[in-house]
Amino acid sequence: MVPEVNAATNGFDLDLTSEHIEPMLQENNDRFVLFPIKHHDVWEMYKQSMACFWTADEIDLAPDLAEWENLSDDSRHFLKHVLAFFAASDGIVNENLVTNFADEVQWPEARCFYGFQIMMENIHSET
């Protein structure tokens, strides 16, 4: 589907009738009932994500201080900027997931997946 430019609003008009909406965004009266699983591919992605689960407490950051001290000033400067980028991006990813996906996604399997992703982004922010 190609959106048409609306000259009055200087934006795009999309035909968002039900046959053009992404299926996982279509209104679903069963959205609060997980079983039976209807979207096995999405459910499998959720299960694969769970298999990669870890917590911040599992990581021993103590050796990092000694390694940090051994870095050159230029390397520390570079790493500070990379870490600052990731600290902000985890927050941006979570904001997008919570603000957009959580309200719009109708499939319970996808909600499980995005809920787990939100939790993992929180762990990334913690570490």
Image (tube, grey):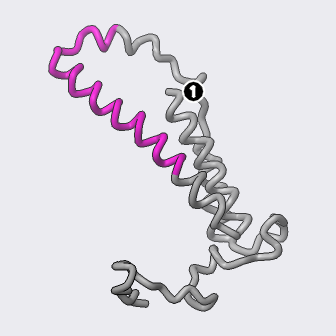
Given residues 24 and 61, the one toward you in this image is 24
| Picture layout, residue 122 above or below residue 58 | below
Given residues 72 and 7, the one toward you in this image is 7
> What's the amino acid at mark 1?
Ala
Question: Is 28 placed left or right of 88 in the picture?
Answer: right
Query: Could you tell me which residue is drawn at 63 percent across and 66 percent down?
Result: 104
Q: Position of residue 38 (x, y in %)?
A: 75, 75
Quarter of the image with the N terminus is: bottom left
Quadrant of residue 73 within the rendered picture: top left
Query: Could you tell me which residue is drawn at 53 percent across and 48 percent down?
Result: 95
Q: Which residues are magenta?
A: 66-95
Quadrant of residue 36 within the rendered picture: bottom right
| Classed neighbour count for the residue bearing mark 1: other residues with Cα under 10 Å, few (<14), some (14–19), many (≥20) | some
Q: Position of residue 27 (x, y in %)?
A: 72, 77
For disc 1, the marked residue is 56
The question of residue 42 being in magenta is answered with no
Question: Is 66 placed left or right of 41 in the picture?
Answer: left
Q: Main secondary structure of the magenta part?
A: helix
The question of residue 87 being in magenta is answered with yes
Query: Could you tell me which residue is drawn at 42 percent across and 34 percent down?
Result: 87
